[in-house]
Amino acid sequence: MVHRKTGRAISALLLLACVNGIDSADAQAACGEAVTLKTHGKTSTPISIAMPAATAPQEGRMVLVLLPGGPGYMALDAKGCARKLQGNSLVRSTKIFNAAGFVTVLVDAPSDHRGEDGLGGFRLSAQHAEDIGTVIAEMRTRTRLPVWLIGTSRGAISAANAASRLSGPAAPDGLVLTSAVTSGKVGGRKAWVAQTVMGAKLENIKMPVLVVAHAADKCIRTPPNLAARITARTNGDREQTIVITGGPGSRGGSSVEACQGRSPHGFIDQEADVAAGIIRFVRGGTY
């Protein structure tokens, strides 16, 4: 079941803008169509669907379902814009993908996981995978296009978990993991900080898999030297692990503070290059 917050709402907003003398460009400045899906139990999950730019190429169009890291709660507003996690690499890259002809879908946290921990330990659950499957199936029905799943940082845990569990129309056609969490903290104050991508049943993943890490990533949870361990366990029909270099680098040693989006962990100043590599792989080539 779907509750649509925009569509008619955007038309109403434009009418209101004309009545009140608001500049129409401001009224149209939506980040995407805001849609709310019914998910596990009696929860609801907001998503933001952004269509390809008008000037984007028609060939090779696909849907990219994007899962941010951190708590996973973006607080999407009625215009489909993220009020939180705005610095996340996937949130920042949506327009790059749209310009290349892709439909993008930002997936917010469900209504029962919007506290301080956000998705927390929910990322490796069957229910979370099913929720993501609901998004994929919705987009497959809407667009009749292939649907790929991309997760970054802790969002990579969610993406790998979903890809390892889902089947049929709810399963993604391919998987991309960037700055994936591969090193957890066992015995921490919160048990879920021990969770990593390696906790998913990676051997069940048989779709194409791309893993992207940054050599200068100093986030203690995403050491680049462990990235290849992911594809060593997956059974994708096409796989590639990439560790990129360049960018502004990172000061200091490994820490949790280095896990911020506007850093090598989030491919700062290299968003366009990373997106271009992802696009090449998704369209059947190599990064």
Image: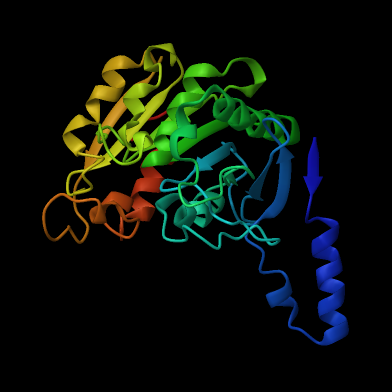
In the rendered image of this protein, does residue 231 appear above or below residue 220? above
- 151 left or right, relative to 182: right
Query: 100 left or right of 49?
Result: left
**Image quadrant where one finds the C terminus:** top left
Which coloring applies here?
rainbow
Residue 48 at x, y percent in the picture: 64, 50
Quarter of the image that includes the N terminus: top right
Foreground: 100 or 156? 156
Name the residue at the front extreme: 189
* Image coordinates for residue 268, horizontal then vertical, percent: 31, 58
Residue at image coords 31%, 26%: 240
Q: Nearer the viewer, residue 86 or 58?
A: 86
> Which residue is located at x 59 percent, y 51 percent?
56
Q: How many marks?
A: 0
Residue at the image point whose x is 74% and y is 30% from the top: 141
- In terms of image quadrants, where is residue 198? top left
Q: Quadrant of residue 215?
A: top left
277 over 55 or under it: above or below: above
